[in-house]
Amino acid sequence: MKTARIYQRPKNAMQSGRARTDQWMLELESVTPQEADPLTGWNGGGDTSNQIRIGFPTLEAAKAHAEREGYAYHVVPAPERKLKLQAYADNFR
């Protein structure tokens, strides 16, 4: 049985916007461990299902898809937002 991880997309660290952070992602986890290629040394394997990421508008839709496809899943809760309140006048203290 395949296992899926459901999580909410994080905010892009390179930009201040929060676009698409309300989307939920379903990502399949690899069944077989990756092994090093003897020629190049890169990690890889024959299982390409861990490259699949599907976006959903709600958590319930992602859960319904996982149950319909027969995946065991676990939900990773979204991290709590921390607001750093600061004023321009604090630069001159």
Image: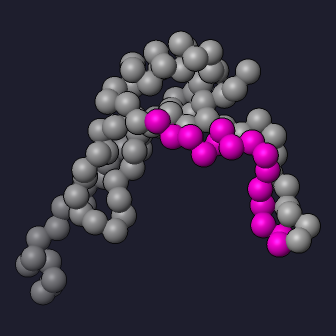
Extreme residue toward the left, this view:
89
Query: Is residue 66 left or right of 17 when viewed as pictured?
Result: right
Left or right: 4 in relation to 23: right
Q: Is residue 86 above or below residue 89?
A: above
Instruction: Give the number of marks.
Output: 0
Quadrant of res 39: bottom right
Residue furthest to the right in view is: 38
Q: Give the image location of residue 92, x and y in percent.
A: 12, 86
Q: On the rendered image, what quadrant is the C terminus found in?
A: bottom left
| Residue 2 pos. (x, y %) | 69, 26
Residue pictured at 46% horizontal, 15% vertical: 64
Identify the residue at horizontal 78%, vertical 67% (top origin). 42
Does 53 appear in magenta?
yes
In front of the other: 7 or 39: 39
For the residue pair 33 and 90, the one nearer the viewer reads as 33
| Quarter of the figure that contains the N terminus | top right
Res. 13 in view: yes
Residue 76 visible in this rendered orientation of the protein: no
Relative horizontal placement of residue 3, taking residue 87 as reference (left or right): right
* Range of residues picked out in magenta: 40-54
Relative side of 66 to 8, left or right: right
Quadrant hosting residue 89:
bottom left
Position of 53 relative to 73 (above/below): below
User: Residue at 55% of width from left, 14% of height from top?
Assistant: 67
Residue 24 belongs to the span the image colors magenta: no
As drawn, 6 above or below 51: above
Q: Residue at x 75, y 42 (%)?
A: 47
**Residue 36 in picture, x, y percent from top left:** 85, 61
Relative to 76, say whether 71 is above or below.
above
Instruction: Tell me residue 55's x, y (percent).
Output: 41, 36
